[in-house]
Amino acid sequence: MLDARFVSDNVDKIEKALKDRGYDLDLTNFRAKEQERLQLLREVEELRGRRNSVSEEIARLKRERANIQPLIEEMRAVGEKIKKIEEELTKLEKDTQDFLLNIPNIPHYSVPIGKDDSENIEIRRWGSIREFDFTPLNHWDIGEILDIIDFDRAGKITGSRFTVMKGLGATLERALINFMLDLNTSKGYKEILPPFMVNADSMFGTGQLPKFEVELFKIIDPEYYLIPTAEVPVTNLHKNEILREEQLPIYYTSYTPCFRREAGSYGKDVRGLIRQHQFNKVELVKFVKPEESYDELERLTQDAEDILKSLDLPYRTVALCSGDLGFASAKTYDIEVWLPAQQRYREISSCSNFEDFQARRANIRFKRAGKKGTELVHTLNGSALAVGRTLVAILENYQQKDGSVLIPDALQPYMKIDIIR
């Protein structure tokens, strides 16, 4: 969430930034309400000051046995006026809060301006794209041939966009999770296994609520939400906390299943593992000082890329343009892995800097050593990696002409085999 005073003081800047993101938003009414709110705050503070001084005067006059009735009447009127202003302030503050909750973050100055993903900027590529001497199969065909993925039985158990992993397919999924966690913890990330359901406040803290409730799976009684990503519970670990400067930066990594309704995505990636209602992911989350957050974003992105390098999977990294940024992000890199059957790169990780957008909503602050007051931390997160999509990339890039799939060297200690037949 953006700071109300910042928005009020920078209306032209905010309107341009939102236009770059594809939001046509008139802030004139917001600025008028914010000025009204600030004026009422000044009035109520003056009235409270008057009430305090008169209370002292009434106490003095009482001791002197003087007539205090006129002052009492005045204070009764002041009290009624304070109550009325406080009611107006409560309504204005709610209106302001509701308005700000639906404004996305402001893009960092380095974010390229563009309308959609067609204007994202490629930053780098890594790895060699394999040349096949046969027509490569889609991962769902490979999974069926090897009897390691079962979409039909998942549909019978639950419905569409769910999957049963079988035999060495399940082993491969588990191996990828353990490999990713081991690599991340070796770099100083602390492993977290959080709850897979959260309350509404946690969804609010990371920006999923109120704007994206349609994308979430919700439990009614008691009211909980199934997490769409580990970012939600892990970021909220420090909700309503004041951290010490020496605690920062904090690095976490977490495996969780993720649950998404994929509302509005009908017809996209209907087959296969790319777009599921339930999928596994390993996440990276950082809490850092503001002046360090963009260096930390580069390091976080590199940490996610290192997993693909270790698995020898070709990929490219792109900087998202303003029109393709996520709601809470100030800057995002997408990492896209090469899928031979589709002859294209597909997203496997998004690495984002939210600056203080989430921290303001979740009230996560830190105190600098020897300084008065507190500051909002900057939060970052990235997938390292989406497990199902990594499995897809391995099946398609490591497939052999006879239908078998080689196991990347880095995974062989986890799988205890070097090939799936």
Image: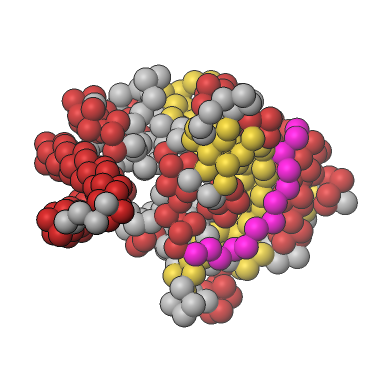
Q: Is residue 237 left or right of residue 4?
A: right
What's the residue at 70%, 51% (across, down)? 192
Q: Is residue 381 left or right of residue 48?
A: right
Q: In the picture shown, does residue 338 fall above or below 234?
A: above
Magenta residues, as a range? 187-199
Q: In this rendered view, identify the residue nearer to me: 68 or 383.
A: 68
Q: Is residue 57 visible?
A: yes
Q: Position of residue 353 (x, y in %)?
A: 49, 33
What's the residue at 35%, 62% (across, down)? 214
Q: Position of residue 397 (x, y in %)?
A: 64, 40
Q: In the picture shown, does residue 83 fall above or below 286?
A: below
Q: Position of residue 20 (x, y in %)?
A: 25, 29
Q: In the picture shown, does residue 127 fall above or below 48?
A: above
Query: Which of the 4 quarters of the picture holds residue 183?
Result: top right
Looking at the figure, which quarter contains the N terminus? top left
What's the residue at 75%, 35% (across, down)? 188
Q: Is residue 276 visible?
A: no
Magenta segment's dominant SS is: loop
